[in-house]
Each structure stands twice: as structure tokens, then as C-alpha cells.
Image: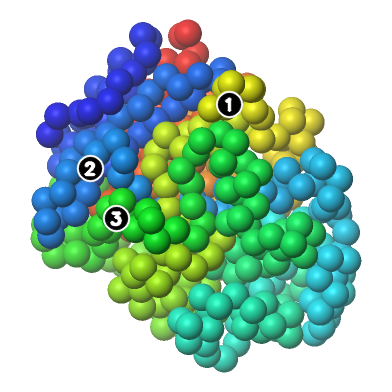
């Protein structure tokens, strides 16, 4: 595989790391980009976007990035807080009165953003059509009792996060998260990050290759797991299989959270469906390229030149500092005790993530199931984005993104 794209002087090691991911049989198709001090310094892509047709991964390819979407939804909420339109310490019912049912009167917007609301799933069942329609999920969440006392612990709201935060955005702005993102953030930056993919863009997404399909095809040579293992290979395949058995037990909290609301999203065939692409699931169905993901994070830590020629910054330094204040401590109730820690919607460079060495103390971002990630570092003024179509097992990245981000961080320190 030949790497396409370019790197700025001083970032040549990132191209080497990108090529190594393919040479080590860790990739099928992928892209990676980085912004440093407001300018793009890495923009790479290569491989195959669709193994059923051998369509190559090109400069225009998009891909669904699962929970990496949450970081972008968090940007929308934090920008509204920056503008004084959302008070994150206010009860959610201030903006969404119906939410005050079932003992949720004191749940704050910060609780939603930091996975402390106790609403990681919805009781009962729902159809995909109801889930894609938005309002049925909002009604169900408003009536749902919390699974633990809100604010007392955190547990990963794998899908419900998007409706919970998204409805606050909608009540405040009168616009869906996808529309607000396009009009107020991604549009001004010229970034192709979609929550709700327009029909005109449906030719562009890569076809995902699930962990199970890759395992069956013997395509997991050299594969690592979570970045907490650093540059090592992580658990072997037998250990991965045992983890999957535990995490995804039929009535396990992660199984319920991943399939929420009401089990509708447990069918993995839905995720390559145009019906899901065009819906808005602000926790999980963002579709983007790597350069747009890097641009968005780059614009959280620096001013980035926009297509109109003006400098554009998503979050002020003051709001970024507020967003990175730790909101949680202790084990995650849904991810079976994993040490993931949260600011206002962003994973922080602490606990499991911090052990990977992803930048400095002001590192932040969000990983997506299968391996994608958007990550920023406020001290280095660095924004990074990695997307791919061959999925690993897990929710916190793997050695592919670790190699790329580590090489980028090292280069940024030298320039």
C-alpha cells in the first residue's frame, strides 16, 4: 500500500507510522490528519474503502466513527455554554421541563455531559424507526428512572448521551445537533463532519469491517487493544475473546448501553444502513474524514483559518479550561470498572487514557468503537483525527492510533 497525502517538514515520522500500520497488516483503509498551532501539518490516507468492490480510500472518503461523535457533540454544548446560553450547573429541566419526571429534578447538564445521569439505557423495547425519529426516544428518556442516584457515580452512556445532550441543544437553539454543528461550527471551518448524512454524500462512506469479520478472516496479526497498554501489543486474542464474553454478557450493562434505547441498535447491520446514516444519533453516527476531525479539535486549542479567510476558534481558552475540569473519579459502572475519567463531555488524559501518554495534562478527546479517535492537546496546540474501516475490539482505541498520535506529539514537541 502506498500512502497518499502529505506531511509538513518535521512530521515525516508520522508518515512512517501511518505506512507501518499497513505494512504490519493492521489496516485495510484509513486516514490520519493533524493541526498544529492552527495550521494543517499532516493529511494522510490510503488502502481500500470497500473490500467488496475494491474501491480505494481516497481524499474524499468518509467513514462512520461511532462514539468519536460524542466529542463533537460536546463541542456544541460547550460552545453554547461559552455563549451563556447553557448553564452546565443548571438542572436539565430548566431547558427540558418534561425531563423532571421519575426523580430526575436535580440532574444537571454537567451530569449529562460527564455520564453521571444514570440513564445509560431505556427500559422496554423500541424499533429502529422509533429511534431514528428522535421524539420517541426523548419521551422515553424523560420518563425513565435513573439506574443509580444521579451524580453519585459515572457510567458510560454509550448511545443515550446523544439524545440527552442533543435535546438540551435543541431546546436552547431550536435546531438539531446536526444542524447546529453544520451551521455554527463545521460549516464555518469547511469541515466534513456530519451528524445526519445528506443524501448527496451517501456515495462517500467506507464500508466497515467488524472485529468478528476480521477475526474470521485471520486479519488481526499484530493487533493491539487499548492505548493503556502503551506501544505493546496488548491482550492476545484469547484474552480479547474472554473480555468480550464478560463485557457483552446478555444482560450486562454494556450490552444494554450499546443496544440502547430499547435494544434497537444491537443489530450491527444497521450501522452500514443509509437509514441510520441520515438519522441523527449524536452519540454514535457521526460520519467524517480525518482532516475534518483534526480541524475541529485543532480549532478547540487554536484559531484556525476558515475558508472565508477569517480565523475561527470553536472554544475560547477559558471555556476549554472549564471543559477540561475533572467531573468524575473512580471506576465506570457500565464499562465494568474501567478507569475512564471525564470533563464536560471529553475523555481526559487521566486514568486509563493517561497511562497511554497521549500528550500532556490538557490532553482531551474521544475514542470511538473500533478504533477511531479525535484528540486535542491544549498545551501543544495540537488537534488530531484518525479514522479507519477495520474495527478492533474495544472503545478506547488500539495501537494503530497510539503509534500515529505518539509520533505527532513527539514531532510537535520538536517544532
Classify 76 as above or below 146. above
Residue, disc 1: 308
Residue at x 34% of width, y 18% of height: 7
Image quarter in which the N terminus is found: top left
- Residue 223 visible somewhere in the drawing: yes
| C-alpha span from label 3 to label 2 | 12 Å
Residue, disc 2: 57
| C-alpha span from label 1 to label 2 | 28 Å
Residue sitting nearer the eye, 300 or 19: 300
Q: Quadrant of residue 99?
A: bottom right
Residue at x 73% of width, y 43% of height: 79
Q: Earlier in the sequence, mark 3 or mark 2?
A: 2
Task: Choose mark 1 or mark 3, whichever is in front.
Answer: 1
Secondary structure of the residue carrying numbered label 1: loop
Classify 136 as above or below 3. below
Q: Earlier in the sequence, mark 1 or mark 3?
A: 3
Q: Earlier in the sequence, mark 1 or mark 2?
A: 2
Q: Pointer 2: residues within 10 angstroms few (<14), some, or many (20+)?
A: many
Amino acid at each position: 500500500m502506498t500512502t497518499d497525502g502529505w506531511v509538513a517538514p518535521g512530521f515525516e515520522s508520522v508518515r512512517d507510522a501511518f505506512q507501518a500500520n499497513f505494512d504490519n497488516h493492521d489496516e485495510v483503509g484509513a486516514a490520519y490528519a493533524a493541526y498544529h498551532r492552527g495550521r494543517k501539518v499532516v493529511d494522510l490516507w490510503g488502502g481500500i474503502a470497500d473490500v467488496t468492490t475494491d474501491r480505494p480510500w481516497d481524499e474524499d472518503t468518509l467513514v462512520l466513527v461511532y462514539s468519536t461523535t460524542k466529542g463533537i457533540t460536546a463541542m456544541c454544548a460547550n460552545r453554547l455554554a461559552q455563549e451563556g446560553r447553557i448553564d452546565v450547573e443548571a438542572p436539565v429541566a430548566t431547558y427540558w421541563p418534561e425531563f423532571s419526571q421519575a426523580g430526575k429534578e436535580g440532574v444537571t447538564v454537567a451530569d449529562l455531559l460527564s455520564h453521571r445521569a444514570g440513564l445509560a439505557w431505556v427500559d422496554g423495547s423500541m424499533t429502529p424507526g422509533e429511534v431514528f425519529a428522535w421524539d420517541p426516544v426523548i419521551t422515553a428518556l424523560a420518563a425513565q428512572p435513573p439506574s443509580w442516584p444521579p451524580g453519585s457515580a459515572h457510567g458510560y452512556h454509550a448511545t443515550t448521551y446523544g439524545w440527552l445532550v442533543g435535546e438540551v441543544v435543541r431546546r436552547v437553539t431550536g435546531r438539531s445537533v446536526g444542524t447546529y454543528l453544520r451551521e455554527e461550527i463545521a460549516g464555518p471551518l469547511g469541515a466534513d463532519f456530519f451528524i445526519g448524512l445528506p443524501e448527496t454524500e451517501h456515495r462517500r462512506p467506507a464500508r466497515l469491517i467488524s472485529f468478528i469479520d476480521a477475526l474470521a478472516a485471520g486479519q488481526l496479526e499484530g493487533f493491539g487493544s487499548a492505548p493503556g497498554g502503551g506501544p505493546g501489543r496488548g491482550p492476545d486474542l484469547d484474552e480479547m475473546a474472554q473480555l468480550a464474553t464478560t463485557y457483552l454478557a446478555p444482560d450486562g450493562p454494556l450490552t444494554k448501553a450499546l443496544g440502547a434505547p430499547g435494544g434497537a441498535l444491537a443489530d450491527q447491520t444497521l450501522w452500514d444502513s443509509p437509514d441510520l446514516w441520515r438519522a441523527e444519533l449524536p452519540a454514535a453516527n457521526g460520519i467524517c474524514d480525518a482532516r475534518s476531525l483534526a480541524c475541529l479539535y485543532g480549532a478547540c486549542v487554536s484559531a484556525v483559518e476558515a475558508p472565508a479567510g477569517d480565523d475561527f476558534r470553536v472554544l475560547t481558552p477559558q471555556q476549554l479550561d472549564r471543559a477540561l475540569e475533572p467531573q468524575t473519579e473512580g471506576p465506570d459502572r457500565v464499562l465494568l470498572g474501567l478507569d475512564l475519567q471525564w470533563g464536560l463531555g471529553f475523555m481526559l488524559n487521566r486514568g486509563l487514557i493517561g497511562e497511554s501518554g497521549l500528550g500532556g495534562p490538557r490532553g482531551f478527546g474521544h475514542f470511538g468503537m473500533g478504533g477511531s479517535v479525535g484528540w486535542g492537546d491544549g498545551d501543544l496546540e495540537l488537534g488530531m483525527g484518525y479514522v479507519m474501516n477495520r474495527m478492533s475490539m474495544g472503545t478506547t482505541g488500539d495501537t494503530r492510533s497510539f503509534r500515529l498520535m505518539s509520533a505527532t506529539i513527539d514531532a510537535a514537541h520538536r517544532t
